[in-house]
Amino acid sequence: MSTTLFTNCTLFAEPYGNVIRNAYLLVKGNTIAETGPMADLAFPEDAKVVDASGKLLMPGLINGHNHCAMTLFRGLADDLGLNDWLHGHIFPAEARYANPEMVYWCTRLAAAEMILSGTTCVADAYFFSGSSAQALADCGMRAVIGHGIVDFPVPSVPDPKKNIETVASFIAEWQDRHPLITPAVFAHAPYTCSPATLRKAKDLADRTNVRFFTHLAEGRQEIEMIIDPQGTSPVRHLAALDLLGQNTVCVHSIWLDDQDLDLLEESGTSVVTCPQSNLKLASGIARIEEMRRRNIVVGLGTDGCASNNSLDMFKEMDMLAKIQKVERNDATAMPAQSVLQCATTGNASLLHLPLLGRLQPGCKADLIVLDLATPHLTPFYNPDLLVYAASGADVHTVMIDGRIILENRKILSFDLQETMARIAELTQTIRQAN
Ligand SMILES: [Zn+2]
C-alpha cells in the first residue's frame, strides 16, 4: 500500500472555518489516514513526503453537472437564448460530429481542464458514455457518468426505441468495473423525453441502483413545451409520474414556485445548480437560497462548456454566492460556507459518494493543494477567501484516490500534448465546415 505524507501545510479541516496551520495529512492507499498539527506527527516509514509549506490542502472540488465532451463546442455558438442555442446549433453539431472517438478525446480535454482547476470528481451527462467512462478512467478522474436518453435519433442511438436498452447495456458494462467510475441514467429533459420514456428511465435507474438525473425547469418555455394534462409545472410533471425522490437529481430547477419547492423538499429530491450557464443563456436565477433554508440538498456544476464556457469550479462558486445575494438584495444570502459545501459535501451527498468532499480520516484521498504564497490569497484568514478570491490557476497539486495526478501544475496521469494534438485535428474539421 502506498503512503503519502503532506507536511507543513495549512489544512482545511472540519468543521467549516477550522483551519489548522502547520499541519500534516497522511494518506494510506486511497484513504486519508490521519490529519493534525505537525507537533503530533509520528513520521511513518516508507512514506512519500510532500512538503506543502506555504500551501493549503482542501477537499477536491466536485463538478455536479457537466457534458464533458462538449469542450469541442466551446465558443461555437455564444450569445444565444437556450432554445436557439440548443435546437439551432448544439443538437445539429452533435448530430454531425459526435462519435465515440470525438467523445473520448474531448472528454480527456475536459478532464485536463478540470484537473488543472482543482476538480477531482465530475458528474458527466452525455452520449457514447462508454467512451466518456474510458476517457475519465484513463485520466485518473473520479466520475459519475449518466448516459443520455432522448426520444429522437442521436448518433449513439439512431433508433430512439432502443434508448433504454442502450443505457441498460452501458450500466451493465460499467457497474463495479472500475474503482473511479459509477454509471448513471441521464434523461435529458421533460421536453425531449415523453412521460413513458421518463418513467422507463427512472425504473432502470431504480432497478440497477444508480442515480437518475434530468435537466428540469431550465427555461420558462419548458412549462408550455410539456404536453401532459397533469403537468402544470415541470416539477409537478415529474411528481405526477412519481419520478421525484432521493434517487433523483434535478439539474437547473430555475422556474419553480413554492409548491414545487415543497415537492422537492418532501420527496428528498436533490438539485444541481449551474449559475454561469443559466446567466449566459439568460435562463434565469434558481431559488438556491430558499432551497438551502429548506435543507434541500443542493450541488453545484458548470454545465457543459458550450454554455459557460469554463469548467473552473472556483469561478462557479464565486458566481453562485454573488448572484444569490443580488437576486435577494441580501448580502447574507448564500454565504461562502454554503457555496463551498455545494461544491464538496453537497455534490458528494447527491451523487451518493459520502466519502468525498472532506479531509477526515476514513474519507477518500481526493484532495487539492493550493499555493497560498501569492498576493491575491494573502492574507488567508479563513476558507471564505477560496470562494471570493481563488481561481483554478492557484491549484498546484491534485490527488485522486490516493494517487497524485497533478504536481506543480504538470499532469502526471496522461499525456496532455497528445490530447491537445487530437483536439486540434477535430477542431480543424469543424472550422473547415463552418
Ligand atoms: Zn446540462
Image (tube, rainbow, N blue to C red):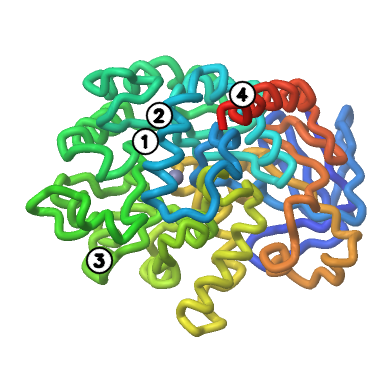
Q: Are marks 3 and 2 in contact (CB under 8 Å)?
A: no
- What residue is shown with label 2? 147
Residue 110: x percent and y percent? Answer: 63, 35
Asked if residue 337 can be seen in this view, the reply is yes
Label 3 SS: helix
> Circle 2 sits in a helix, a strand or a loop, which is it?
strand
* Mark in front: 4 vs 3: 4
Residue tagged 3: 262
Label 1 – label 2 distance at C-alpha: 5 Å
Q: Residues within 10 Å of mark 2 (few under 14, many from 20)?
A: many
Question: Is there a contact, CB below 8 Å, between mark 1 and mark 2?
Answer: yes
Give the CA separation, mark 1 to mark 3: 24 Å
Position of 332 relative to 253 (above/below) = below
Q: Which residue is mark 1?
A: 186
Q: Which numbered disc, 1 or 3, marks the residue that appears first in the sequence?
A: 1
Q: Quadrant of the N terminus?
A: top right
| Circle 3: residue type | Asp
Describe residue 309's horizontal placement relative to residue 389 as left or right.
left
Mark closest to the chain's N terminus, 1 or 2? 2
In front: mark 1 or mark 3?
1
Q: Horizontal placement of 108 versus 417: left or right?
A: left
Check if mark 1's residue and mark 3's residue have beta carbons within 8 Å.
no
**Mark 4 to mark 1: distance in Å?**
29 Å
> Which residue type does callout 2 highlight?
His
Q: Sequence-wise, which precedes: disc 3 or disc 2?
A: 2
User: Number of callouts in the render?
Assistant: 4
The residue tagged 4 is 429
Q: Label 3 to label 2, Cα distance in Å?
A: 29 Å
Image quadrant of ligand 1 equals: top left
Query: In the image, residue 53 lies at what x, y percent?
Result: 92, 52
Amino acid of disc 1: Phe
For residue 403, side relative to residue 163 (left or right): right
